[in-house]
Amino acid sequence: MNTNEKKFSRKLSPAKSARMVETIYGCKWSLTVYQLLANGINRPGEMVRSAEGLSTKVLNDCLKRNVEFGILERIAYNELPPRVEYKVTPFGMKFIRILDELEKLQDEIDAEY
């Protein structure tokens, strides 16, 4: 064996980011929520009314997961009646750009077959 040969160790996938992508794609509503936010719809009630088939419970679960990952920020206003809004964090903007690139890759794959 040549002593100049470089040995490579097994490359592992990035655990947390891979889990984030898997979880977000596993939630069929996350991409719709990002689209709603991009169109200025940032209140949960308005999101439910704007997306056909989206329930309040499913939306709340989706929003909670996105907040836990740091993709979205929840802003609660100290008002009566209570008002809550969501916005994409700077980290979330980076993450959504990656998802956009994955979508472009899928479009290329679909065009080939």
Image: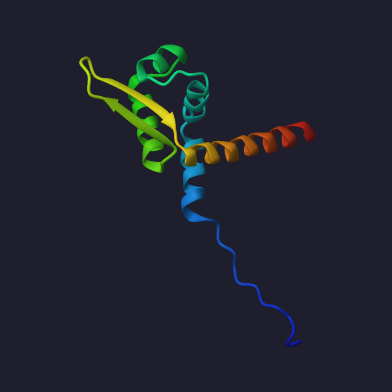
Who is closer to the viewer here, 33 or 11? Answer: 33
Quarter of the rendering containing residue 73: top left
**Which residue occupies 73% across, 81% down?**
5
Q: Nearer the viewer, residue 85 or 107?
A: 85
Check the image and tell me how it is coloured: rainbow
Left or right: 99 with respect to 73?
A: right
* For residue 81, above or below residue 31: above
**Residue found at x 37% / y 37%:** 67
Image quadrant assignment for residue 61? top left
Quadrant, the N terminus:
bottom right
Left or right: 91 as drawn, with respect to 82: right
Measured along the vertical axis of the image, is residue 51 above or below residue 57? above
Residue 35, percent from left and from top: 53, 24
The foreground one among 68 and 93 is 93
Q: Is residue 44 left or right of residue 78?
A: right
Q: Residue at point 55% right, 36% down? A: 96
Q: Is residue 104 left or right of residue 22?
A: right
Q: Quadrant of the C terminus?
A: top right
The residue lying furthest to the front in this view is 78
**Quarter of the figure with residue 82:** top left
Q: Where does residue 29 sit, x and y in percent of width and height?
A: 47, 27
Q: Report the residue that reaches farthest toward the left.
A: 80
Q: In the image, what residue occupies the spot 45% across and 36% down?
A: 89
Would you place residue 53 above or below residue 97 in this image? above
Residue 78 image position (x, y, % from top left) = 22, 23
Q: How many marks?
A: 0
Of 4 and 76, the residue lying toward us = 76
Looking at the picture, how far across and down is residue 19, in whole percent?
A: 47, 47
